[in-house]
Image (cartoon, rainbow, N blue to C red):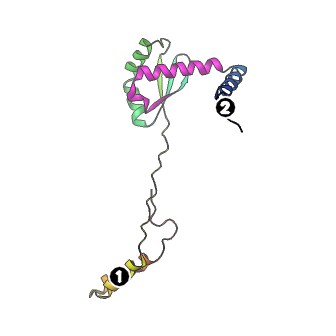
């Protein structure tokens, strides 16, 4: 497939035409305008934790990243509403919060690989221990260090 500078414009034009044919272009433009108003009126503190989801003409539904943010939005409801009205969204009468947390993935912990030489040194050291329980525990540990990890071992989230 050849790429050209005009290709993004052609795609945008195709999308615009499809939206018009299906009667959605006005709604999309309106939602984009309300989104810009929300970002300007609510301010930077809200930009990272909220986004406009729906505008029905009087109620603005705002997606938020956590229940704590939803609580904050309800607490600041009147102030945010007044700010939106001052900035030109005079029809807005209600703000609704909908919690939609972003998926958080923690990286898997990496299993430490120990050298066979380290396992041998551990076993040799264990042989010198007088306490039989401690010696057995160290020998078991040396055996585990020498063996590869089983599936899922050493991984956590």
Q: In this view, does 12 lie above or below 104?
A: above
- Numbered disc in front, either 1 or 2: 2
Asked if the stretch drawn in magenta spans residue 32, the answer is yes
Name the side, left or right, on which 3 lies relative to 66. right
Check the picture and name the quadrant holding the C terminus.
Answer: bottom left
Q: Gap between marks 1 and 2, in whole Å?
A: 64 Å
Residue 125, by quadrant, is: bottom left
User: How crowded is the residue under tag 1: few (<14 C-alpha within 10 Å), some, or many (20+)?
Assistant: few
Marker disc for residue 78: none
146 vs 136, left or right, is: right
Q: Position of residue 99 (x, y in %)?
A: 48, 35
Is 96 situated left or right of 133 in this image? right
What predominant SS class does the magenta segment belong to?
Answer: helix
Extreme residue toward the left, this view: 130
Q: Mark 1 points at which residue?
A: 121
- Say which residue appears at 65% left-offset and 25% top-offset: 9
Q: What stretch is highlighted in magenta?
A: 25-52
Quick check: 79 above or below 111?
A: above
Frontmost residue, 82 versus 143: 143
Q: Residue at coordinates 46% horizontally, 22% vertically from top-left?
A: 38
Residue at image point 47% right, 49% down: 105
| 119 falls in the magenta region | no
Residue ID for mark 2? 4
For the N terminus, the image quarter is top right
């Amino acid at each position: 497939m050849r790429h050209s500078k005009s290709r993004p414009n052609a795609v945008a034009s195709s999308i615009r035409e499809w939206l018009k044919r299906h009667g959605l272009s006005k709604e999309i433009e309106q939602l984009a305008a309300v989104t810009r108003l929300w970002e300007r009126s609510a301010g930077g503190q809200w930009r990272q934790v909220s986004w406009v989801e729906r505008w029905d003409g009087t109620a603005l539904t705002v997606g938020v990243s956590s229940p704590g943010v939803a609580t904050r939005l309800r607490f600041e409801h009147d102030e945010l509403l007044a700010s939106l009205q001052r900035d030109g969204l005079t029809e807005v009468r209600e703000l609704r919060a909908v919690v939609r947390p972003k998926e958080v993935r923690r990286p898997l912990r990496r299993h430490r690989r120990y050298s066979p030489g380290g396992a041998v040194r551990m076993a040799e050291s264990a042989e010198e221990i007088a306490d039989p329980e401690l010696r057995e525990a160290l020998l078991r540990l040396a055996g585990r260090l020498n063996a590869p990890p089983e599936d899922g071992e050493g991984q956590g989230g």
